[in-house]
Amino acid sequence: SSWPGSCGERTAPLLARPRVGSRPRAMPRALPLLALLACAAADGPQGLADRARESESERLVHIGNECHGQAYGPRCHGRGVLECSQGTTLSFAVCKAHEECERGACREAACARKDDGLWCHGGRVVECRAGKTEGARECGAHEECEVDQESTPSVASCQDICRRKGSGSYCEDGRAVACSENQVVKVSTCAFSQECKSISGSGLARAACEEKDCAGHASGTYCMHGGVVECRDLRGASLSKCPFYQECSEHSGSHGTARCVEKACDNKLDGWRCHGKHRVRCADSLTVDFEVCSNFTECGLFEGMVEPVCSLDGGGARALDMDAMQLPPG
C-alpha cells in the first residue's frame, strides 16, 4: 500500500514486487538505493513521522497472514473469523456486537440461553427472541444498562448513571460526573495526564480530575503513554506519540530530556528491512521510508530476494533471518 505522493508511490516503478505466489526475482541493488535517496530528500524526517502517525490506525488493525502453517478452513482470531487455505489467509470477518467467535464461526452470544425480552449486553440493551438478537440500543456516555429484576419477561433499559446517587460528583470510567437530583448535569473528561479522584471531606460527594503523570516532575519531557509527555509547571502540557519505527528514550543520568529515537533501523544496514509485520527503509541507521503491508500479508525476506516484500508466503521460498543483517561493530 502507498500514499499519494509518498515515497512508496513515487518509487513504485523502481521497486515493483513480484505478484504473490510467484518466486521473487533478484533486482539490482542500485535501484533501491537511488529511490531511497530521492525519497529521503523529498519527504524529510518530519513528513515521514507525520505519515507514520496518519497510518497508525491502519497499522494497528492490520491482519497479517495469521493462517501461516495452518490447515484449510475457518478459525477464530480475536473477535472475528479467519478463512485459511494452504497456509494463507483468504479473508477475515469481524463478528457483530452481539456475537462471539466459537469453533470457527460467529455465534449468538447476547441472547444465547436467554428468555424472550430485553437484556443487557456490553453496555447495550438487546431484544431477545427465540435465543436470537432481534434489535439493540447503545446506552449513552452517561448511561448504564440495567435490568428490572422483578419484571417478567425481562425488561432492560438505559438508565442515568446518577439515578441511584445523591447530589455531588463521582468518578466514572475516567471522568468526573456531577449529579443533581438523580440526573447527570456535567461530565468532565480527564486529560491524558490526569486521573479522576474522590475528594474526602464532609458534605456532598466530591470528585475531580487531578494531575497524575507530571505531579512531582520538574518541567521537561518524559517517556509515558508510548510517547513523549511534556511537563510544565507540574502539569501535562502535551503528548507526542513516537512513530512506530521509533521509541521514547531519556538521556542516561539526565531527567526531563526524553525524545523519540530510532528503533527499527538503529545499527542496521542501508536498504529495506522488516519491522514487525511491515517494511521500513534504512539509511545511515535511520528510517527514511516505510510501507504498511496490506491485510493478509506480512513483511518477509525470502531466499532468492535482495530485499524483503509484503507477501503471503514468499512464493514458497525459504524465509531468511533479517536480524543478522546489521552493521559490524565499530
Image (spheres, rainbow, N blue to C red):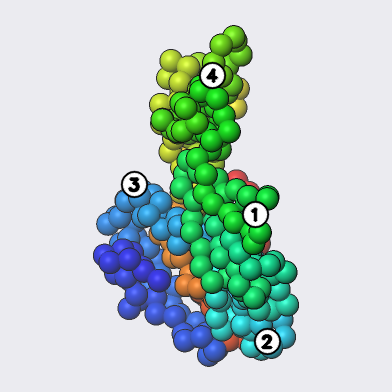
Q: Which residue is mark 3?
A: 46
* Distance from the alpha carbon under mark 1 to that under mark 4: 34 Å
* Distance from the alpha carbon under mark 2 to that under mark 1: 44 Å
Q: Which residue is mark 2?
A: 73
Amino acid at pointer 4: Arg
What label does residue 151 carry, if any? 1
Q: In the image, which is nearer the foreground, mark 2 or mark 3?
A: 2
User: Given contact means CB atoms under 8 Å apart, are the residues at marks 2 and 3 in contact?
Assistant: no
The local secondary structure at tag 1 comes to loop
* Distance from the alpha carbon under mark 3 to that under mark 1: 60 Å
Amino acid at pointer 3: Gln
Point 43% across, 77% down: residue = 28
Q: Position of residue 269 (x, y in %)?
A: 53, 58
Sequence-wise, which precedes: disc 2 or disc 4? 2
Sequence-wise, which precedes: disc 2 or disc 3? 3
Amino acid at pointer 2: Gly
